[in-house]
Amino acid sequence: MNQWLDNFKRTWWVDLMGLTCVVLLAVGTWVAAVEPMLESRARREASQAKYATQRREATVLKSRLARVQRGVVEAEQALKDNRIRLQPADQVNQHLAEVTVLAGSVGLQVDGIVPEMRDRGGPVHAWIKIKLDGVGGYRECAAFMHALGATFPDTGIEAFNLTADPRDAAHPVAFGFDLIWHTAPPGSRGSDAVLTAR
């Protein structure tokens, strides 16, 4: 054992150099091979996770796009279905007669119906204001408003006024409707002019 100790004292620096070389070789192997491999693996996993996220987002966006495209097709069809053919303004007397018949059919008594004002409008349509006055009940007035929209989609109600004496429930209500009849613009054929319902 003494001899081994003497040997160690003479050669310790060689052993230390050998141990240092082994440690340096291990660190070099780690730096040169293992660490880049681990970094590459981490980058690959991050890239795969990002790719999976992007695929999910693409699937969601594709689904949304399909829904939007279906909505556009449905909206275009609804616009086509809701196009209102406008009549020429020179048919105002016929329109007044039809509105009067409609009011009578729901139980209103028309005292007066007068076209008040014309507007040349624009390239799409023109309009005529119509004043409708008479008497009837509240229910009949509500029924008239509903029937007007269903029967004449080209005629809207700009304003209305209902007046009654609260002390006399048996007396009918006096009504006044300010209507707007959308017509074809001057110089166009009625069948060519359309108004898109809102």
Image (spheres, helix red, strand yellow):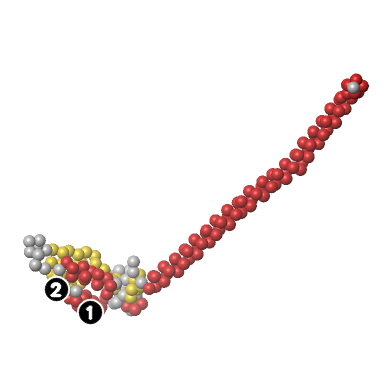
Q: At x 32% / y 78%, what residue is drawn?
A: 190
Q: Nearer the viewer, residue 118 or 192?
A: 192
Quadrant in which residue 35 is drawn: top right
Instruction: Identify the secondary structure beneath mark 2.
Output: strand
In this figure, which residue is indicated by the disc labeled 2? 109
User: Most extreme residue toward the left, as rendered?
Assistant: 167
In this figure, which residue is indicated by the disc labeled 1? 94
Quadrant in which residue 139 is drawn: bottom left
Q: Position of residue 48 (x, y in %)?
A: 63, 52
Q: Earlier in the sequence, mark 1 or mark 2?
A: 1
User: Most extreme residue toward the front, as rendered?
Assistant: 1
Quadrant in which residue 140 is drawn: bottom left
Q: Nearer the viewer, residue 15 or 195?
A: 15
Q: Report the side of 50 relative to 157 (left or right).
A: right
* Amino acid type of the residue that numbered disc 2 sits on in the rendered structure: Gln
Q: At x 13% / y 66%, what residue is drawn?
A: 173
| Badge 1: residue crowd in 10 Å (few <14, some 14–19, many ≥20) | few
Instruction: Identify the secondary structure beneath mark 1.
Output: helix
Q: Report the side of 182 relative to 37 (left or right).
A: left
